[in-house]
Amino acid sequence: MSLEDSLLETLRKIEALHAGTSFDGERDATKNAAERIRARIAELRGREKDAELRYSLTDPWKRQLFLALCRRYGLRPFRRHGQRASSIQVRAPRTFQLETLWPEYLALADGLHDHLAAVTERAVRAAIHEDVTEAPQASEPAALPAATEPPAGNGKATP
């Protein structure tokens, strides 16, 4: 299984989990996960009003993921005039946003991060250098030299 196939399978499993699928790995369940979640939104809208929440996502890859996830569930993310590109507003039931949308996004973002880290490491190893480990921490910093003369001042002596 390729790295990309592995990522896609992970993302499908995460969505199935958040859709309330009880059959792990069931292909039909993962295909229908978005439908189940859209049905949950409709049910919640019957019980509570939409709330407008603001999300701040500075990482462009994670922001793209969040926007796609919102759109997948029929939500219309937007930005108010003057808001930063990292700000995203979403109108949906608060319960859905806090208990389904955001936790699912976090799980998907972790999967995406792991995938991008693996791809980056593989590319750097192949194209630049095999050793991609972190730089070791240096020992204690060198001490400042002892002062031999008083610092320059205004020429007046102080007791």
Image: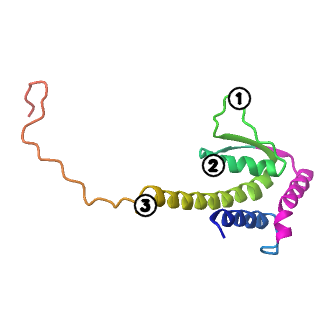
Dot in front, 2 or 1: 2
Q: Earlier in the sequence, mark 3 or mark 1?
A: 1
Q: Quadrant of the N terminus?
A: bottom right
Q: Position of residue 39 (x, y in %)?
A: 90, 57
- Give the quarter of the image for residue 150: top left
- Tell me the CA gap for discs 3 and 1: 42 Å
Whether residue 10 is in magenta: the answer is no
Q: Position of residue 63 (x, y in %)?
A: 66, 46
Q: Is residue 25 above or below residue 109?
A: below
The secondary element bearing badge 1 is classed as loop
Q: Which residue is mark 3?
A: 132
Which residue does the image show at 80% across and 47% down from the upper left?
A: 71
Q: Position of residue 54 (x, y in %)?
A: 70, 42
Which residue does the image show at 86% across and 46% down from the upper left?
A: 49
Contact (CB < 8 A) between labels 2 and 1?
A: no
Q: Which residue is mark 2?
A: 61
Dot in front, 3 or 1: 3
* Magenta-drawn segment: 27-52
Whether residue 30 is in magenta: the answer is yes
Amino acid type, callout 2: Trp
Q: Which residue is mark 1?
A: 81
Q: Is residue 141 left or right of residue 37?
A: left
- Tell me the CA gap for discs 3 and 2: 22 Å
The secondary element bearing badge 3 is classed as loop
Q: Earlier in the sequence, mark 3 or mark 2?
A: 2
Tell me the chief SS of the magenta region: helix
Q: Is residue 138 above or below residue 93?
A: below
